[in-house]
Image (cartoon, rainbow, N blue to C red):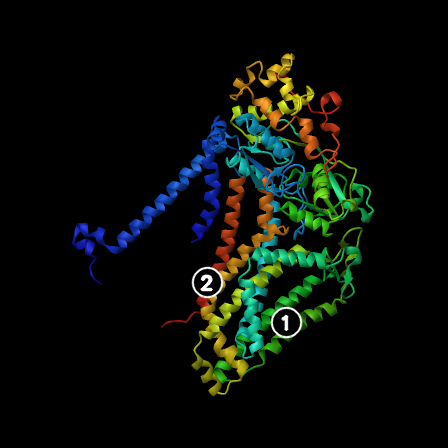
């Protein structure tokens, strides 16, 4: 009887890791092809990054990264499947092979990159952790939060940065740790917490998407951490890692070259040897990635360049109203930089 | 004693029912172990391939996250092991308080269900049906939202009686500030309890011998209350209240019962009490009517009939299903993770995620809840043996 109960916990965990054997050793691409879809671990619902719309279609920057990979692999950005995950489930879902990529606003850290067995593709959004408070509290800065109750999601770098920040500044706080994003947001907006902390993009998304009146809430100026948000894949499959990496470089590279989804057909006639190699007019890179030579063309045609994806999902014309800031191209003083296509 | 057939006919042992039963059990057990070993081996290999380290060494690392509420002093500089201990104490507190209150309310509900009053009986039935037929997690969310939304913010907190504040941060209560003299008071209390137990034993023996009843309850209460009170007064009544005061955000000082803790305990108690109520009703109805009729015929008062004749017999049938309910309550406390109370499961879940050691963390979760359940059922089984019908 008791053995059975224990098995109920242990067996799924073991099975998860045992089954993932099939997805290893260069086999992710084969698996994806045989299933006919790219499976992405997504957020349960974060506006601008990964949130299902009323038709159940995932929308957002992370969702578009997933679609771009599908476009590169299948030439069809619609061949995607999203697995909604909480902060606590996301790594297990990827490690057990249930998903092929983790596209869920995940911070790239040393331990995740090593001990947790993840490989991070290029950063798709450079973020930093901040605090949001109700305007009527009159709080102007994070240093005034001594003794506050703070809403936070578990299993995040946010939770650790929060404790570090208060320790460094010799302040105390009471955490309210709730797993589901919607419940954390409810707790904050109902006044259970004095402040809500997560990545500033997430704060903007929550304020735009969940507050009854977004103007009643302010995001404090302090940025207490670096949060480079990047897609991740499992250790041990370099072929798949390369595909995800270069899909993102293709989006950034296209913006560098001024190629958009509207002008990509035009660009096929370009004389620029860089553009020719990228779009597969001069073959080579596609074959090296074990993909069709049109892979980058399909990404740009169907999903767009990085700038388009940014503006469409989180840019100044969206409810999130985020500036490009450090997410601009390196040529504009930002950090977005594609490796050379040769 | 007959000579076992196996000795008489060499090959017949295979046809022996007991040998066969044992053989099948051994085969199935072996198969389960084989599958587990295979899966374990496979998982180890895969983990190594993915470069994920395996082992419990990470437990000594600094946790780095804050936990609130914590029963023992805790800072993010503590180790993962210590963080787990903080969570475990929270779980034990919920389970202990939950079991006591669920039993008390369950007993009441069970008695109300049997009430001759039509309205009271129906109300109790309605309560039982409502609680048993809706998901617990939903009930917890309802309690949590009710407690959180109905109360005002800390600055507009309701002061129920001086020093007790109700806000959406919880109920802030004053607690007596610690004084060195409390040790003597505590010792007097222990001495009083021992004396009361001795008295109860003596009174029972005397009643068995002479039939003379003794007002045990009143005298025992006096024995328990008076000595500590006398010591307390003799020490000059060193009593100060640690009053909650409104800080910049929350109440500081005193003790704060958070809405998450309250929602979890209330939710578990109210839910489990419905099941316990039915067990109590069933237990009482299982005692044959003749028993109470006979007791009444002997001239016992109604309350004595219930306490001395019916309940002791009902308890015998109630204990085993009651054990199940206690185990359920302890295990259901893991739903704390949904409403943001830092119980053992919630803390371990966080550790799992911060470190990525899924198999290790899940093994620890399984081990702790298994030990918790086994200890609980061991205690209940001991009690069961104590009250069970002694067959001679």
Q: Secondary structure at mark 1?
A: helix
What is the quadrant of residue B391 in the picture?
bottom left
* Residue B98 makes an appearance in the image: yes
Q: Which mark is residue A299?
A: none
**Distance in Å between CA atoms under marks 1 and 2:** 29 Å
Which corner quadrant of the image does residue B353 belong to? top right
How many labels were placed on the picture?
A: 2
Name the disc covering residue B224, or none: 1
Q: Which mark is residue B381?
A: 2
> Is residue B59 among the parts visible in the rendering?
no
Indicate the quadrant containing the C terminus of chain B: top left, top right, bottom left or bottom right: bottom left
Q: Chain of mark 2?
A: B
Crowdedness near tag 2: few (<14), some (14–19) or many (≥20) residues, C-alpha within 10 Å: some
Q: Work out whether residue A230 or residue B235 is closer to the camera in this orientation and state it.
A: A230
Q: Is residue A170 above or below residue A333?
A: below
* Mark toward the start of the polypeptide (1 vs 2): 1
**Camera-nearest residue between A118 and B5:** A118
User: How many residues crowd mark 1 within 10 Å: few (<14), some (14–19), many (20+)?
Assistant: many
Image coordinates for residue B305, horizontal then vertical, percent: 51, 81
Residue B372 % position (x, y): 52, 54
Which one is closest to the eye, mark 1 or mark 2?
2
Q: Residue furthest left?
A: B9
């Amino acid at each position: 009887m008791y053995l059975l109960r224990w098995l109920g916990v242990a067996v799924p965990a073991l099975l998860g890791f045992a089954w993932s054997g099939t997805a290893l050793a260069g086999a992710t691409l084969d698996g994806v092809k045989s299933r006919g879809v790219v499976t992405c671990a997504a957020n349960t619902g974060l506006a601008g990054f990964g949130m299902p719309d009323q038709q159940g279609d995932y929308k957002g920057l992370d969702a578009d990264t997933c679609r771009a990979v599908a476009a590169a692999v299948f030439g069809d950005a619609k061949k995607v499947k999203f697995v909604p995950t909480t902060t606590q489930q996301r790594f297990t879902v990827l490690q057990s092979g249930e998903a092929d990529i983790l596209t869920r606003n995940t911070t790239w850290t040393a331990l995740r990159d090593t001990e947790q067995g993840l490989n991070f593709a290029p950063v798709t959004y450079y973020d930093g952790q901040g605090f949001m408070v109700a305007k009527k509290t009159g709080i102007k800065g994070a240093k005034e939060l001594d003794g506050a109750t703070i809403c936070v999601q578990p299993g995040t770098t946010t939770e650790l940065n929060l404790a570090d920040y208060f320790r460094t500044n010799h302040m105390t706080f009471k955490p309210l740790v709730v797993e589901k994003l919607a419940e954390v947001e409810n707790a904050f907006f109902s006044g259970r917490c004095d402040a809500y902390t997560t990545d500033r993009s997430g704060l903007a998304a929550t304020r735009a998407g969940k507050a009854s009146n977004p103007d009643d809430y302010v995001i404090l100026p302090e940025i207490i951490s670096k949060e480079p948000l990047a897609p991740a894949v499992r250790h041990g499959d370099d072929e798949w890692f390369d595909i995800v990496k270069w899909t993102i470089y293709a989006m950034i590279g296209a913006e560098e070259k001024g190629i958009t989804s509207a002008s990509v057909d035009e660009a096929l006639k370009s004389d620029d040897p860089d553009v020719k190699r990228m779009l597969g007019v001069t073959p080579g890179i596609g074959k090296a990635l074990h993909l069709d030579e049109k892979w980058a063309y399909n990404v740009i045609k169907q999903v767009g360049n990085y700038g388009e994806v940014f503006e469409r999902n989180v840019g100044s014309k969206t409810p999130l109203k985020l500036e490009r800031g450090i997410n601009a191209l390196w040529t504009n003083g930002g950090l977005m930089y594609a490796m050379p296509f040769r | 004693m007959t000579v076992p057939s196996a000795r008489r006919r060499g090959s017949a042992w295979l046809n022996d029912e007991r040998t066969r039963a044992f053989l099948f059990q051994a085969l199935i057990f072996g198969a389960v172990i084989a599958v587990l070993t295979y899966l374990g081996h496979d998982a180890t290999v895969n983990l190594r391939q993915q470069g994920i380290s395996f082992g419990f060494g990470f437990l000594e690392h600094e946790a780095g996250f804050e936990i609130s509420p914590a029963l023992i002093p805790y800072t993010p500089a503590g180790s993962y092991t210590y963080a787990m201990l903080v969570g475990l104490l929270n779980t034990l507190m919920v389970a202990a308080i939950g079991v006591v209150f669920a039993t008390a309310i369950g007993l009441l509900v069970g008695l109300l269900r049997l009430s001759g009053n039509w309205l009271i009986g129906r109300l109790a039935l309605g309560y039982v049906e409502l609680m048993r037929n809706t998901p617990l997690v939903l009930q917890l969310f309802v309690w949590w939202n009710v407690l959180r939304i109905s109360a005002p913010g800390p600055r507009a907190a309701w002061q129920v009686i001086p020093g007790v504040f109700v806000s959406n941060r919880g109920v802030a209560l004053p607690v007596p500030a610690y004084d060195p003299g409390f040790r003597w008071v505590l010792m007097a209390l222990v001495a009083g309890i021992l004396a009361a137990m001795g008295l109860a034993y003596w009174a029972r023996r005397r009643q068995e011998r002479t039939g003379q009843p003794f007002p045990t309850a009143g005298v025992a209460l006096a024995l328990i209350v008076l000595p500590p009170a006398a010591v307390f007064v003799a020490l000059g009544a060193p009593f100060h209240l640690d009053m909650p005061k409104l800080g910049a955000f929350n109440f500081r000082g005193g003790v704060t019962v958070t809405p998450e803790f309250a929602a979890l305990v209330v939710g578990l108690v109210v839910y489990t009490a419905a099941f316990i109520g039915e067990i109590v009703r069933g237990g009482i109805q299982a005692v044959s009517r003749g028993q109470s009729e006979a007791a009444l015929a002997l001239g016992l008062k109604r309350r004595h009939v219930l306490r001395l004749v019916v309940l002791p017999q009902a308890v015998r049938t109630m204990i085993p299903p009651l054990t199940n309910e206690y185990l359920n309550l302890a295990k259901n406390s893991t739903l704390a993770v949904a409403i943001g109370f830092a119980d053992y499961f919630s803390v371990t879940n966080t550790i799992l995620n911060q470190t990525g050691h899924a198999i290790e963390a899940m093994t620890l979760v399984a081990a702790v809840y298994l030990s918790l359940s086994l200890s609980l059922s061991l205690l209940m089984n001991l009690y069961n043996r104590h009250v069970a019908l002694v067959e001679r």
